[in-house]
Image: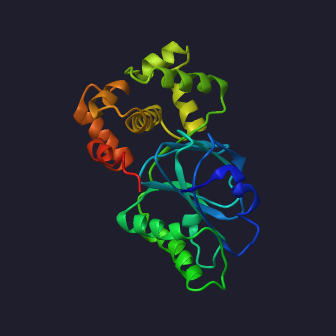
Amino acid sequence: MHKEYVDKYYLTEVDTFEQSIYCHHAVMGEHHVTEHFHRKGQFLYTEGGVVFLKTPEKSYFLPARHYIWIPGGVKHSIHPSGPQVVMRNLYFPKFATDTAFFDKINIYPVNDLLIELIMFTNRWNGNIFPEEEPKFSIAKAFKLILPEISLTELPLALPYPKNDKLKLIVTYLEQNIAENISFKSLAEHFDISERTLARLFQKELNMSYIQYFTILRMLTSLKLLLDEKLSVNEVALRVGYNSLPTFSNTFNKVIGVRPSEYVKNRNLLL
């Protein structure tokens, strides 16, 4: 039986000992983890549901068979699809061997080797101190190997707009995701010039309209595949793709696997 999150260890225990590695595997037991931060960097892998992680700047979507690295000091809240989600966390202090990889928040696919390492850490709980050998060296090696096997970062995040007009536009896109909304029709709907709208997207979100809408559609399709157990064809239609091959190719480009392969793994609970 997994320990639950109700003790809020992430607020009270993770940073108690500066040089320790902290390990925690648990069923959520909560509908969300409120905004907080810790000085240690966090490796987070989840099972049994969909997880959104929010920072002041972006909203991240963590799907099955992926992990997120959260640098120390980054404020974040965690929003799982339900309290049954299992969270597997390792919190690491800074090491002299750390590279720039650990300075930014990102999502990466999990390969079979990393799955085995994650499951190996399931035997640990709480602080692992430097004098606890070989346990500490094994846990440290877990962190050291991440940059070597995490070569493909996924754009599973959407930035929050600060501009009031763009907030309305983004909400409109979310509510009409099944529609094929051209850039021209979007500009006309909100009575704004195409040139101004293009500048807004680049300035506020650092991406074009088509990039934003495509990622929004793919993140929504991930949620539908995982949460509602729809077929790939049904999901494609719900996010505005009448052509299944086009949807599959786009999904593969953004997510890194084809939706048919993703569906095969969606019920995998380790």
**Coloring applied to the structure:** rainbow
| Apparent side of residue 130 relative to residue 11 in the rendered image (left or right) | left
- Asked where in the image residue 129 lies, by quadrant, the reply is bottom right
| Position in image of residue 249 (x %, y %) | 27, 41
Residue 147 visible (yes or no): no
| Apparent side of residue 127 relative to residue 99 in the rendered image (left or right) | right
Q: The C terminus appears in which quarter of the rendering?
A: bottom left
| Position in image of residue 201 (x %, y %) | 54, 33
| Position in image of residue 164 (x %, y %) | 66, 25
Q: Is residue 160 above or below residue 85?
A: above
| Apparent side of residue 155 relative to residue 258 in the rendered image (left or right) | right
- Which residue is depicted at the point 33% across and 49% down? 265
| Apparent side of residue 6 relative to residue 243 in the rendered image (left or right) | right
| Position in image of residue 22 (x %, y %) | 64, 68
Q: Is residue 121 above or below residue 233?
A: below
- Which residue is depicted at the point 68% across and 54% down? 74
Q: Nearer the viewer, residue 204 or 18?
A: 18
Q: Nearer the viewer, residue 29 or 21?
A: 29
Residue 17 visible (yes or no): yes
Q: Is residue 111 above or below residue 177?
A: below
Q: Nearer the viewer, residue 107 or 159?
A: 107
- Which residue is depicted at the point 68% across and 74% down? 20
Please tell me how many numbered marks the rendered image carries.
0
Q: The N terminus appears in which quarter of the rendering?
A: bottom right
- Which residue is depicted at the point 47% across and 45% down? 156
- Asked where in the image residue 103 lies, by quadrant, the reply is bottom right
